[in-house]
């Protein structure tokens, strides 16, 4: 039996092994992805991002628990977590694993947790994450939580990968104004002020709401009818009758589980919005295009590398280091054989 | 007169214009880079990075002032600052410019400051920064400070670009343990605890020193002879007689200018270490190789895009979205014309 067949049958060992193949980008992994791809497209991908110290890991942990035990007569859904650990770009080794933190979910067959080091190349990270998501999707996990740390390109990549992106903030992490500079607000579908029992939570929430007004001009429509706080539903009906998603700002204390139900409901509402507005299909398409572009780029470069001689490459590098040719001339020399 | 010639003559308007060409990746910009490249290789590139809220901008500002007014009979050096503003990856627009903050340096011909939005592609950002650094280097700026926000790939790219990398921390920005997870310690040549007048500065410093012991095993050699704190010089002579750089941990209150002299001396010492150990040349070479790789990749992709028909591309995307072919099959179809 192939690993892919094992994954489709619900074999967890096959799943874990295949994810390792994906992480190492092996031929077997690629073949399995091809086999599994027709079985993908059902999972709801939820990105969870935010600066260090915001308590993302606890939030993801609690969210996974809630999805497994939703209460109110709702059926539990199968949930997978990919925690991208931006440990060491140079050694590739995580100093502290965070698999431990999910201990209380261990033993539940409806939960699968995987940590991944962020390693060197970012294109590589995006491609690996995308491959892992496909495997977990094909394996029947209905919700896939992808957790990343930091503020920057990784968050943009997650926003491109996810259907729904949660941005987690916390009070007292320096100037709220910094959040704008990091630009992560624009990728947020749902904003969470975690550690909301700490001093300054109101200020953080207010700052986020003010910034949302700048980032989402449609909200100005509603300012004439009332304050932003009065917009109770996240999904609102603007003047042109197109459903527009206004990111809700929610408060949580994830370590105590408080506010988590609202977060989960917002995720469900966001999915409904995406489906009703046709945006789900758009995001699927743009996600696949982004993935294709990444794979194309990697393939073009690796094919080129396989056909250039190491000697020729070293000769050009040497001329570059001596500053006898410029970097652009070096590219021309390598690609076109110019003896500039 | 070409822009490049203007830059070599010290014309600031030509410099500003050329940097805009570099930012927009124009043909004129590329030609000028070729013209200027033989004049590069003299500047000391210093990367300054750290999480939002650590006060990096103030630190860079004070450092630039100190480099212009070194005191103690030292000659002032010409200093350029590239502040990479990670504003909006989607709109490309900075909500808050930070050019204002350098107001007190305005009017000094020995200082040049440039802010840059981080925009979409990271490859693009690295290439643009590298091009700007070359221009400023050719223009005769002896110290080039490159400031970035965040923790992630951007910091790794800076470490690859810079000769010396400063990582700035501050007390009270959440668990110190998070700093490890972000992995930025491994790229640090100099660690700065800024806002050292705030509560918790000692803890932050101690946590950094403890983590350094993990990240730099060579220090264990010295633990037998005394505590880490007793190693007063940053450059030490280990058992094998090779000079090894142990990143110093320095305290500053940048807004008051305190501790800045120590930071500047550490930067000077690090350069001396790089030159004495031969690492300066190694970093130069690896920097140029990284830049070449980025340009090669971008060129391969753009050449391929220019020769593929939009129709063919859309046809493959459609089959991908319908999940009739996998992403890897789509790559093969596009590159090899497979009708899989």
Image (cartoon, coloured by chain):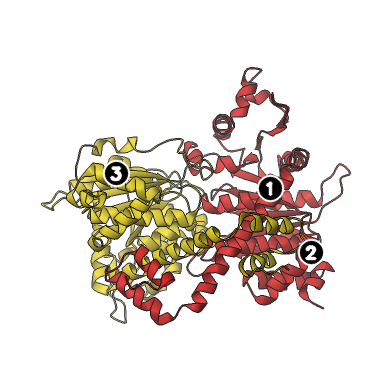
Chain colours: A red, B yellow
Q: Quadrant of residue A272?
A: top right
Whether B320 is drawn above or below A55: the answer is: below
Q: Is residue A267 visible?
A: yes
- Nearest the camera: B267 or B179? B267
Q: How busy is the neighbourhood of tag 2: few (under 14 within 10 Å), some, or many (20 plus)?
A: few
Whether B275 is drawn above or below A75: the answer is: below
Q: How busy is the neighbourhood of tag 3: few (under 14 within 10 Å), some, or many (20 plus)?
A: some
Q: Is residue A142 left or right of residue A207?
A: right
Chain letter of disc 3?
B
Chain letter of disc 1?
A
Q: How busy is the neighbourhood of tag 1: few (under 14 within 10 Å), some, or many (20 plus)?
A: some
The secondary structure type at the circle numbered 2 is: loop
The numbered disc on residue B16 is 3
Residue reaching furthest right?
A73
Q: Is residue A339 left or right of residue A138?
A: left
> Mark 1 sits on what residue?
A283
Q: Earlier in the sequence, mark 1 or mark 2?
A: 2
Work out how far the residue at label 3 is from the one at label 1, CA to CA, in angstroms. 39 Å
User: Residue placed at 82% from the left, 52% from the top?
Assistant: A77
> Mark 2 sits on what residue?
A107
User: Residue placed at 43% from the left, 80% from the top?
Assistant: A310
Work out how far the residue at label 1 is from the one at label 2, CA to CA, in angstroms. 33 Å
Work out how far the residue at label 2 is from the one at label 3, CA to CA, in angstroms. 61 Å
Q: Is residue B155 left or right of residue A130?
A: left
The numbered disc on residue A47 is none
- Nearest the camera: B213 or A281? A281
Check whether the beta carbons of the residues at disc 3 and disc 1 lie within 8 A of each other.
no
Whether A209 is drawn above or below B226: the answer is: above
Q: Are marks 3 and 1 on the same chain?
A: no
Check whether the beta carbons of the residues at disc 1 and disc 2 lie within 8 A of each other.
no
Residue B248 in picture, x, y percent from top left: 33, 61
């Amino acid at each position: 039996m192939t690993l892919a067949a094992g994954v489709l049958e619900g074999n967890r060992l096959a799943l874990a092994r295949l994810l390792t193949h994906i992480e190492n980008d092996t031929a077997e992994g690629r073949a399995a992805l091809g086999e599994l791809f027709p079985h993908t497209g059902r999972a709801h991908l939820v990105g969870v991002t935010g600066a260090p110290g915001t308590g993302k890991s606890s939030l993801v942990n609690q969210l996974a628990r809630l999805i497994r035990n939703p209460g109110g007569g709702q059926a539990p859904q199968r949930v997978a977590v990919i925690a991208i650990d931006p440990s060491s770009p140079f050694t590739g080794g995580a100093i502290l694993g965070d698999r431990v933190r999910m201990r209380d979910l261990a033993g539940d067959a409806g939960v699968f947790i995987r940590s991944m080091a962020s390693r060197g190349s970012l294109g590589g990270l995006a491609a690996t994450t995308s491959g892992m998501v496909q495997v977990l999707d094909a394996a029947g996990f209905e919700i896939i939580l992808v957790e990343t740390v930091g503020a920057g390109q990784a968050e943009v990549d997650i926003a491109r990968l996810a259907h729904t992106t949660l941005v987690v903030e916390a009070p007292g992490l320096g100037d709220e104004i910094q959040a704008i500079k990091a630009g992560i607000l624009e990728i947020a579908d749902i904003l969470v002020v975690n550690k909301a029992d700490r001093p300054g939570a109101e200020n953080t929430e207010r700052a986020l709401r003010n910034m949302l007004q700048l980032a989402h001009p449609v909200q100005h429509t509603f300012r004439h009818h009332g304050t932003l706080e009065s917009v109770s539903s996240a999904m609102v009906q603007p003047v042109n009758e197109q459903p527009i998603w206004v990111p809700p700002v929610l408060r949580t204390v994830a370590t105590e589980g408080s506010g988590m139900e609202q977060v989960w409901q917002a995720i469900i509402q966001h999915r409904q919005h995406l489906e009703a507005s046709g945006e789900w299909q758009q995001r699927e398409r743009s996600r696949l295009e982004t993935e294709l572009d990444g794979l194309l780029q990697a393939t073009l470069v690796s094919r080129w590398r396989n056909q250039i001689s190491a000697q020729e490459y070293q000769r050009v590098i040497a001329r570059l280091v001596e500053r006898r040719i410029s970097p652009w001339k070096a590219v021309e020399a390598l690609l076109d054989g110019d003896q500039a």
